[in-house]
Amino acid sequence: MTRELVVDDEQARLIVESRAPIAIRDRRGRVLGRIVREDSEDAPPRTWSAERIGELEQRLDSDGPWYSTEEVLEHLKTLESS
């Protein structure tokens, strides 16, 4: 079931005029989500080309190396402390 959130006129204007992603925050500043306009270069593609699908399939079939999210985050922490 899709739910709706109605924005006021000022919020709608900001969304329409923005070309960059917009973070939606609660009153405490916690990010609840993001709006990315479909015509933004940051928007995910609506369709994938056969070439892009082939590239992704090749990556899946490769022997890696593969890293978990946790491993990547740990590596990034070591780079920050250097």
Image (tube, rainbow, N blue to C red):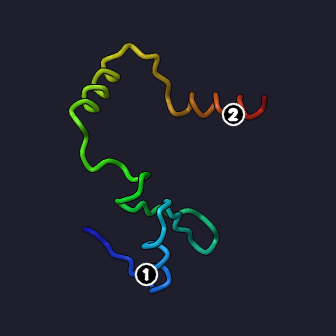
Residue type for callout 1: Val
Residue 61 x, y percent position in the rendering:
30, 18
Q: Is residue 68 left or right of residue 73?
A: left
Assign the C terminus to one quadrant of the image.
top right
Q: Is residue 24 left or right of residue 16?
A: right
**Residue tagged by mark 2?**
77
64 over 25 or under it: above or below: above
Residue furthest bottom in the image: 9
Within 10 Å of disc 2 (Cα), the crowding (few <14, some 14-19, many 20+) is: few
Count the labels in the image: 2
Res 47 label: none
At x 71%, y 30%, the residue is 79
Numbered disc 2: secondary structure: helix
Q: Is residue 13 left or right of residue 51?
A: right
Assign the N terminus to one quadrant of the image.
bottom left
75 over 18 or under it: above or below: above
Residue furthest right in the image: 82
At x 50%, y 60%, the residue is 20
Q: Nearer the viewer, residue 56 or 14?
A: 14
For residue 2, which quarter of the picture? bottom left
**Residue tagged by mark 1?**
7
At x 32%, y 23%, the residue is 60
For residue 63, which quarter of the picture? top left
Within 10 Å of disc 1 (Cα), the crowding (few <14, some 14-19, many 20+) is: few
